[in-house]
Image (tube, helix red, strand yellow):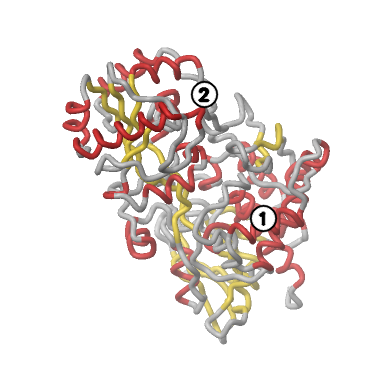
Amino acid sequence: MKKTQSDVIIIAAGAAGLAAAVSAAQSGLSVTVFEKNDVTGGTANRGMGPLGIESRHTRARLLQPTKDEAFKVFMDYTHWRVDAKLVRAFLNKSGDTIHWLESLGVEFVEPATYFTGSYQTWHLVKPETGQPGPGGAATMMKILTQKAIELGVDIILESTVNQIIKENNIVVGVKVTDKVGNKIEARAKAVIVATGGFGNSPEMIREHTGFEMDKDIYPFRISGVTGDGIRMAWEVGAQKTEMSMELVYGMPDPMNVPPQLHEACRQPHLFVNYLGERFMNEAIMANVTFTGNALSLQKDKTGFLIFDENILQIMANDFDTRNRVFPKTNFENAQTIIDAYLASGKGNFYVADTIEDLCQQTGLDLDGLTETIKNYNAFCQNGYDEQFNKERKYLRPLTGGKWYAGRHFPSAYGSAGGIKINEKTEVIGQDWRPIKGLYAAGTDACSIYGDSYPFIFPGTSMGFAINTGRIAAENIVKTPNL
């Protein structure tokens, strides 16, 4: 068995791991990173940018929130069912982390919001080519990777960490299998777990969240994100936290649905469950977490967004709501897009000449949907939604011609939680004291959301990963034995 020695070992080279690696190396520590995929970046390669509070960008534009306001809103949102000291440490550091990333060469185009009413905390990465959007943050991951290598970090790809080594109640290293099957025992004075959660593990999702992958939840599936770090931390005595999915919603495989069609099916029109009944105020559909919550309570965790020929014509000119992930303003060329999608056979979108035909295709209850449309049209005529108080401007009656429906399920950007840490990112053991030598950062330890991802602060997930990675490295530097 090959044996190695370094000051710090980091398990995985995603946003948290790379931030920790660069930060530790900048302080003069020797760092080894083991990544089981053949590329670095992890989930962040699909993202757009991190949260920043009181960065130079938000301050220059006089944008809220301040650090104090952000902390109050965050804790009110989570009803104080999260670690307040960890939340405070993360939020307070987030603006400085934007400046730190810029010092490494990352460029940001603007602080953005996700939907109307959320804060402009999302610092969108300027990609090497094209416009900011999904995948734009891959440029930031590339820069972090290059900087880590320049600083002497040893990034070993296609190498799977199998076990954390603990001796005399102190974590001293890891056991690894490299890409050709060789065994490595890597020793260090500190180990950081940063494996990105369990968002691509059907077994852990079922056991810890109650969802069934590709049946009633369709998360973004990132290779290698299977809960390895969480499992290994538990094996050496780490406390468990509450575990959940970072819920959003949409049609299955949304990146392969034409974006205009995808957004047309997320506009605030009639939204019903299999019983044909409304179950939420459709005006909140722009808040993808709240909608994911509502969907998860329905029969088969399923909803159908229904519109007719008249509403389709309205959407051809303008969408009611927009967002930065799919920044489409209208449903132009609707018929061409719909025809092509139906011909593809991908499913989950339906066109019918009658309500009866629509129910036959979708499995919706005909009597329930008929009654719902009758009542909903009365609300539209009266200008008041007495069921859910939906804003009057979104109340449009359904009169037919053609009928359209998009089927939605809960989705998720990934998991949340698993390893309990403190505000220093030290892993907490069963005795409520830190396990010496063991740290965790990012999604593996992200238990700060309560029951719902706080999309009021967009960029939180990536921001938590990068900031806790930095915090872990900085606290390791302060440890006496280093």
Question: Which of the 4 image quarters holds residue 83?
Answer: bottom right
Q: Is residue 201 visible?
A: yes
Discs 1/2, front: 1
Which of the labelled discs sits on residue 73, or is there none? Answer: 1
Q: Nearer the viewer, residue 81 or 398?
A: 398
Q: Earlier in the sequence, mark 1 or mark 2?
A: 1
Q: Nearer the viewer, residue 63 or 123?
A: 63
- Judge left or right: residue 477 versus residue 373: right
Instruction: Name the residue rendered at 69%, 68% in the picture.
Output: 85
Q: Position of residue 326 (x, y in %)?
A: 51, 30
Question: Which of the 4 image quarters holds residue 277?
Answer: top left
Amino acid found under the numbered disc labelled 2 = Lys
Q: Secondary structure at mark 1?
A: helix
C-alpha distance separating marks 1 and 2: 30 Å
Q: Tag 2: Cα neighbours inside 10 Å, few (<14), some, or many (≥20)?
A: some
146 is higher (above) or lower (below) than 1: above
Q: Position of residue 304 (x, y in %)?
A: 32, 36
Q: Position of residue 258 (x, y in %)?
A: 40, 25
Q: Nearer the viewer, residue 315 or 253?
A: 315
Which of the labelled discs sits on residue 328, or is there none? Answer: 2
16 is higher (above) or lower (below) than 273: below
Amino acid found under the numbered disc labelled 1 = Val
Instruction: Name the residue rendered at 37%, 47% in the picture.
Output: 295
365 is higher (above) or lower (below) than 478: above
Q: Position of residue 354 (x, y in %)?
A: 21, 22
Which of the labelled discs sits on residue 245, or is there none? Answer: none
Quadrant into which the C terminus falls = bottom right
Q: Tag 1: Cα neighbours inside 10 Å, few (<14), some, or many (≥20)?
A: some
Q: Is residue 7 visible?
A: no
Instruction: Name the residue rendered at 31%, 21% in the picture.
Output: 399
Q: Secondary structure at mark 2?
A: loop
301 is higher (above) or lower (below) than 445: above
